[in-house]
Amino acid sequence: MMTNYQLILEDLQEESPQNPSVIPPFYLDDMSTVQKLKTLNRQLRRAKSLSNRMETLLSLWYIRSILETQVTTAERTLCLRELTGHYATTSKRIYYLFEPLGVQQIMRTKHMTVTMVYKLTKAQHIKLVEEALTIAGARL
């Protein structure tokens, strides 16, 4: 039986489909960052309720993407209040795993779940991020 680490690594290496269709975030560009996060939280709850594994991963990636690239230090605290500790941690892990490979790689995953990512040790997560960087470099 493969471990969570091995299954996630396999998903990071997946190359099919070559041009996956990515579900866009449900927010509008002119919304405030807090409003975008509230909208993404609704998208996350919807995906989770529908047991949509890929959309759940994608929603968490979008959430962390906003936190990493669009918020000021002052806004960050307000935005983090919109997330549970579990989702704050998991969104960060998912974002860093897929940052070098692009959001399209989430749509190529076959096994990865939010729970699998959450259960990784810190050392396993760091190793997978390094693997993702290596994979991205090899694809250039």
Image (spheres, helix red, strand yellow):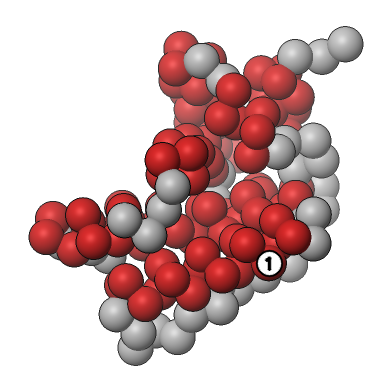
Expressed as whole percent of the image width and height from the top left, the position of residue 138 reads 58, 32
Mark 1 surroundings within 10 Å by alpha-carbon count, few (fewer than 14), some (14 through 19), many (20 or more) = some
Q: Does residue 60 appear to the left or right of 9 in the view shown?
A: left
In the rendered image, which quarter is residue 37 located in? bottom left
Seen from the viewer's position, the closer of residues 100 and 112 is 112
Expressed as whole percent of the image width and height from the top left, the position of residue 109 reads 75, 43
The residue that disc 1 covers is: 46
Count the marks: 1
Q: Does residue 75 appear to the left or right of 31 in the view shown?
A: left
Residue at (61% x, 56% y) in the render? 58
Q: Is residue 95 visible?
A: no
Residue at (45% x, 58% y) in the render? 63
Seen from the viewer's position, the closer of residues 83 and 118 is 83
When the figure is inspected, residue 113 is found, relative to residue 82, above or below; the finding is above
Residue at (48% x, 80% y) in the render? 27
Quadrant holding the N terminus: top right
Quadrant holding the C terminus: top right
Mark 1 lies on a secondary structure that is helix
When the figure is inspected, residue 21 is found, relative to residue 89, above or below; the finding is below
Residue at (79% x, 35% y) in the render? 111
Q: Is residue 26 visible?
A: yes
Expressed as whole percent of the image width and height from the top left, the position of residue 28 reads 45, 85
Q: Does residue 112 appear to the left or right of 103 in the view shown?
A: right
